[in-house]
Image: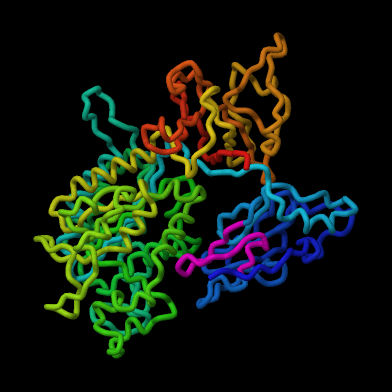
Amino acid sequence: MTSRRLGSLLPLALLLGVVACGSNPPTNWCDGVECGEGECRELPFNQGPYCACWPGYHPGGPGDLTCVPNDPVDPCLDVACSYHGTCTVAGTVPVCNCDLGYFRDSSGLNCLAVEPPPDAADADADADADADADVPSWWTDEPVRQPGLTKLDMLFLVDNSGSMGQEQAALVERFPELLTELLDPPDRNGDTRPDHAAVEDINLGVISSDMGTAGHAVSTCADPLVGDDGCMRHGGSAAIPGCALSYPIYLQRNPANAETYPVELVVQDFACIATLGTRGCGFEQQLKAMRKALTDNVRPGGCNAGFLRDDSLLALIFVTDEEDCSVKEDHPEMFDVDRTDLGHLNIRCFAHPEFVEDWADYATAFRSLRPSGAANVFLAFIVGVPPDAPQCIGFGDRLSECLSVPAMVEMVDPAIPSQLIPSCNTMMGLAFPPRRFVQLAQTFGKDAYVDSICKTDWTAAFGSIAGRLVEDLHDDYFCLDDVRSFDAGTCTLGCWMVETYDDDRPCAADPGCPQTWCPAATAEGLRSLAACRDPSSSVECVPLKRDLGLDARGRRQCLIRQAPRDPASSRCSTVLGDGWYYEPVEWSAHGCPELVYRRTSVEPLFESGSGAALRCPR
């Protein structure tokens, strides 16, 4: 579903009646603005206020300055995307795809300008505004992942249906290896140093697959309305000796409590909250539960508030022996046991795929959870792929043949017509073809991993997951989405890397080329930068970070130096200074158009609390 395009938006000041001709704008545009289910923020370039609405709401009312509920049938209904984008539905969540020259805000429902509007004082401003509104900027920006992240938000979905007893035990048994690798890395090579940097700050939560049955009474589903509703489970398990009755909504270990909260205790606490038991609803809606947990439920006042942070790597781990059956909100009949015309309840998701939400909507929803998109999201699935099918085990970019494996083809079991033929059957129990999970993994490529829940030993699975998380958190390179034009003769890429701080503090100083030697510059004028020069000798220099002034929100922007390389060296392999550089696909050790970050000191290239984007000409 997509929203209707409604033409040009009237100037917000006219809608509000707050600025008369020739008057100055208020010092705080949000004074007196009550968004309701959201918060008021200021538009870029001093254009007025707007509402960033909480999940489940979108801007509406006069001037779009009230947060109104999303339509349950068509979530994109009346979602205008600031009249500079198109709304698409990711499951039940509306998300704006913004026009060229506009960026999506953190709520996902506003498209904000990246360049200032035409001069309002110009006599032809009103006539030119509409004509210029769709003129694209000269550049495109691709957000890039920060190297050296040490924050990890990890959420486990644990199936708590009747068949999951052994699998939950296996999770608890092997989880210490995963967590220890992340928080207290070993020294395998004997050089007296950890093999990699430790994760310094982790949020750790557990949810179940129980999302209720739309109010229909179904055996094993204690709460038929919403089930556990994607809220994190934090009660202690009675099956494990020593567990407390209750724990925090999610576990936290960070520099503030690391000395008093050792890794061993984190592992013990996780075992207590992850052993959910097997009395949960047998109608599993895993993807819906994960999306609800990280959208509606993380808003202020939500049951998972505070868990999801903007500057972390997000890891979503699914442990389930059933295929996802996230039912569309407008098809509650899927759960109606009296609807015998729909077939046996156990196989309705197979028999009626038209009632199930598109798995691709969840790919969009999970990507939109991070400000930098999919770059900081990792998915892992311990699911019912056959343990003896190598085509189905590994990272998502290696699973192209998995769905063709015979055991992965869904078929009704002729011996038991009320169930499908299992995809695997071992001492761990039965599991069924997880096609939707594999499709998600294929979409996320190297940022997703799949292994079999039917294995008795999950050591290899958790080892692979830990290895990729460590790589994503600490590697000093980043794979771009698209191939860029590279000049091998000069070893340079015709792009710029712009870092944006979260405040107005100055760009990090470079003693070899101070900011005072550099003419004023802006992020919009990168194609015509005047060189920095030593005033005593007029010798040109390039600082590691050059001040580009403040953006429309008062945040400092800094140009990060493209590291110089020697064109005479093979494949430009001799790097002559700090900064970032580009490796073409054919040179990359990782088989991708790759950014590499180089810093000879121990300080990271990016500042804490900043974001960065590669800016390239169109």
Frontmost residue, 582 versus 282: 582
Pick the quarter of the image with the C terminus: top right
Q: Position of residue 91 (x, y in %)?
A: 45, 68
**Magenta span dominant secondary structure:** strand
User: What stretch of residues is rendered in magenta?
Assistant: 79-98
Q: Is residue 255 visible?
A: no
- Picture residue at 25% right of the left edge, 74% below the top: 282
Q: Is residue 547 visible?
A: yes
Image position of 66 with respect to 203: above or below? below
Q: Is residue 340 magenta?
A: no
Q: Position of residue 476 (x, y in %)?
A: 42, 32
Q: Position of 301 compared to 540: left or right?
A: left
Image position of 375 with respect to 354: above or below? above
Q: Position of residue 450 (x, y in %)?
A: 27, 53
Frontmost residue, 573 versus 333: 573
- Picture residue at 35% right of the left edge, 62% below the top: 232
